[in-house]
Structures are given as C-alpha cells and as structure tokens.
Image: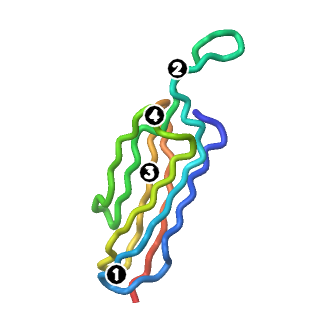
Amino acid sequence: MAENVTPRVRVPSEASAGEEITIKTLISHTMESGQRRDGDGELIPRSIINRFVVNFNGENVIDVELAPAISTNPFFEFQATVPESGTFEFTWYDDDGSVYEDAKEVTVS
C-alpha cells in the first residue's frame, strides 16, 4: 500500500434539477512507474492508481483507466448533470490492490 494516499473531492452541495455541475478530484499518490531505481540500484516496484471510477446513485458517470505515464497526484475535473438528489461515489484503484473511496452528496432544490 502506498503511504499517505489522500483523496480530495470538491462537489457542490446543492444544484438545480438538470444542472451541469463541475466536479474536481485530486488524490495524493507518488505514482511510481516501476522504471526508476533506488539508492542500491534495485528497481522500485510499480505503484500507480490504475483506475478511477465515479458513480451517481449507482449509475456510472466516469470510468478511466490510467497508464504508467500519469503524473504524481492525479487531478481530474469534469462536468456531470444532476437529475435528482443523490450521492457521488468516487473510487481509485491502486496496483497493489488498495482501494481508496470517498462520497459526496448533492441536494437538488
């Protein structure tokens, strides 16, 4: 498991029905490519976030597969239409099997 992995998500807490909102996510992760060597000349094992998934009330909004060339601390910004009140669920999958999750609720007024 990578150390000090911290997901951060910014979602408006309120929206109008059918409104398009902007969602921003960032996860603190070193994203080691597996191609660098440590001080002893040994390869540092690959450890990247390889998939990012967002669902809203159980329906998929975004599903991204990431490659080793992705930067440290990957940031995503995207728009989503909010038809009703509900919960956005965010999931990041790590090469080592770790899963990082966060959830944010949106109330439609």
Q: Which residue is mark 4?
A: 69
- First in sequence: mark 3 vs mark 2: 2
Q: Which residue is mark 3?
A: 91
Amino acid type of the residue that numbered disc 1 sits on in the rendered structure: Glu
**N-term-proximal mark, 1 vs 3:** 1
Q: Secondary structure at mark 2?
A: loop
Q: Looking at the image, which is closer to me, 8 or 35?
A: 35
Residue at the limit of the structure toward the bottom, as seen here: 109
**Residue nearer the viewer, 65 or 104:** 65
Q: CA distance from mark 3 to mark 2?
A: 26 Å
Kind of residue sitting beneath label 4: Ala
Residue type indicated by callout 2: Gln
Q: Which residue is mark 2?
A: 35
Q: Quadrant of the N terminus?
A: top right
Q: Nearer the viewer, mark 3 or mark 2?
A: 2
Circle nearer the N terminus (4, 3): 4
Where does the image place residue 84, in percent across and percent down from the top left?
32, 80
CA–CA distance between discs 1 and 2?
44 Å
Q: Given this view, does label 1 or label 2 mark the residue nearer the observer?
A: 2
**What label sits on residue 83 in the rendered view?**
none
Is disc 3 placed on a helix, strand or loop? strand
The CA span between labels 4 and 3 is 20 Å
Query: Which is closer to the viewer, label 1 or label 4?
Result: 4
- Residue 41: horizontal and vertical position, in percent? 65, 9
Q: Are marks 3 and 2 in contact (CB under 8 Å)?
A: no
Horizontal and vertical percent for residue 104?
48, 67
The tag earlier along the polypeptide, 1 or 4, is 1
Q: Is residue 20 left or right of residue 7?
A: left
Question: Which residue bears the numbered disc 1?
Answer: 19
* SS assignment at label 1: strand
- Residue at image point 61% right, 44% down: 5
